[in-house]
Amino acid sequence: MFKRKIYNKLKEWKCENNGKKALLIEGARRIGKSTVVEEFGKREYKTYILIDFSVVSQNIRELFNDMSDLNYFFLQLQLQYKVDLYERQSLIIFDEVQLCPLARQAIKVLVKDRRYDYIETGSLISLKKNVQNILIPSEERKISMYPMDYEEFLWAIGDNVTTEILRKCFNDGKSLGDSVHRKLLRDFRLYMLVGGMPQAVNEYIETNNFRKVDEVKRDILSLYHDDFMKIDMTGKSSLLFDSIPAQLNKNASRYQVSGVLKGERADSVLELIAQMKDSKTVLIAYHANDPNAGLSSNLDLGRFKMFMCDTGLFVTQMFSDKDFTDNIIYDKLLSDKFSGNLGYLYENVVAQTLAANGDMLFYHTIANEKTKHNYEIDFILARKNKVCPIEVKSSNYKTHKSLDVFCDKFSDRILNRYLIYTKDYSKDRETICLPVYMAQFL
């Protein structure tokens, strides 16, 4: 199993709750939820039982129809799985819990019983759809899980040193030097191409073949399309998802729903967008109408940008018109010799990085009525009682007109201002210019 940061959160939950709450891990498919939870059961408990509702027998499924006799329930689990359960020393995992809503409802009585610990995992799309006739347990604690971030990717390929060095340079405000920076940027582009889906990372490590990695990612995208059909049978969500790269490439001030779904406007698909966001397969950045420390209180639901949860999947989606993404294309992207603007690719990886850090995504545009030119801040972070605007560039250029305009307009609200680009760490007066691989420290 790859080392994942969420493992420490699981240990904290176990220690702090002592059986008082179950844990529901929210996240997209194929990000490694089941793997990390089973490994947690093996390492941190005397015994564990994993109930996978995608393959479970009818006998086990029917146990959840009547939870009035827990002694009988636990006896049957031990008999069926041939595992002894020990009070306060055993874990029961409900994997793919969306396929058995009654199991999720049972959490209430199981947690109250306090004999064992419980973790649930599943697809959020289905979780949201399969709760109409059950009582949602208040005895759940929810945490979000995302694809592997850059540090986890480095761990996977055997690099346990780079992140700490980068963190020190970020904290000290020091550059790394041209030769070191070029290597680090190439390593980060490798992460962007492979992505953070554990299956894709494993395929890269085993084969060192981008074509095989791409095939894995295409299979994952196909699974996501299957999940989108559970939201609506019209195919609208799939079209919205498939159009993410093209929409970002337009460099428009919002996702233009009418350009994807003829006759539709953003306001007419708000529920669909919310369901896609809940699925964690996409990341939504909302426009902050009045950018201040309370960003979530003034967002515009009808004005948003959409990103993909994993930049590796984004790369594959960019070239979905081909049967496979040719190794030549990957090689050009890796060596930064691909002809074309890749700003939207870097925007996506920054969105993914910020989301993995636990930040909600917001952006802001300022219209210049004289020139009719929009100045756009790609991301805004709330820190302390102020904001940190971020402009993202896919080039070495340190121009940051949008940052300047934004900071002039909201000068009393600015804590720090950042330009994320592809050059070494530097400062341009008040603007902190960060290489993209340092975005993880914001």
Image: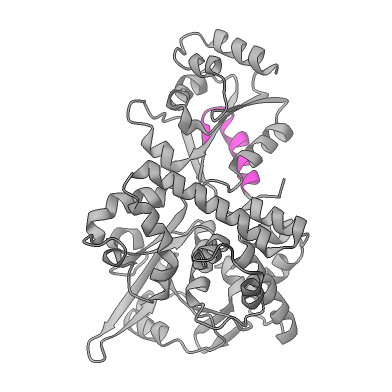
Q: Nearer the viewer, residue 255 or 228?
A: 228
Q: Residue at x 22, y 55 (%)?
A: 268
Q: Nearer the viewer, residue 379 or 147?
A: 147
Q: Residue at x 61, y 39 (%)?
A: 34
- Decide if residue 282 is on the left or right side of residue 406: right
Q: Is residue 402 above or below residue 59?
A: below
The location of residue 436, given as percent across then percent down, is 58, 74
Q: Is residue 328 above or below residue 44?
A: below
The location of residue 188, given as percent across then percent down, is 65, 70
- Decide if residue 216 is on the left or right side of residue 45: left
Which part of the image, by quadrant, shows the C terminus? Answer: bottom right
**Is residue 387 shown to the viewer in this render?**
no
- Decide if residue 293 is on the left or right side of residue 334: left
The location of residue 203, given as percent across then percent down, is 70, 55
Q: Is residue 83 above or below residue 149?
A: above
**Is residue 333 shown in magenta?**
no
Image quadrant assignment for residue 264: bottom left
**Is residue 11 shown in magenta?**
yes
Q: Nearer the viewer, residue 164 or 275?
A: 275
Q: How is the image coloured?
A: one colour
Which part of the image, by quadrant, shows the N terminus? Answer: top right
Stretch of the chain drawn in magenta = 6-24
The location of residue 362, given as percent across then percent down, is 39, 65
Q: Nearer the viewer, residue 328 or 105?
A: 328
Residue projecting furthest to the bottom: 370
Residue projecting furthest to the front: 323
Instruction: Count numbered badges in the picture.
Output: 0
**Is residue 283 shown to the viewer in this render?**
yes
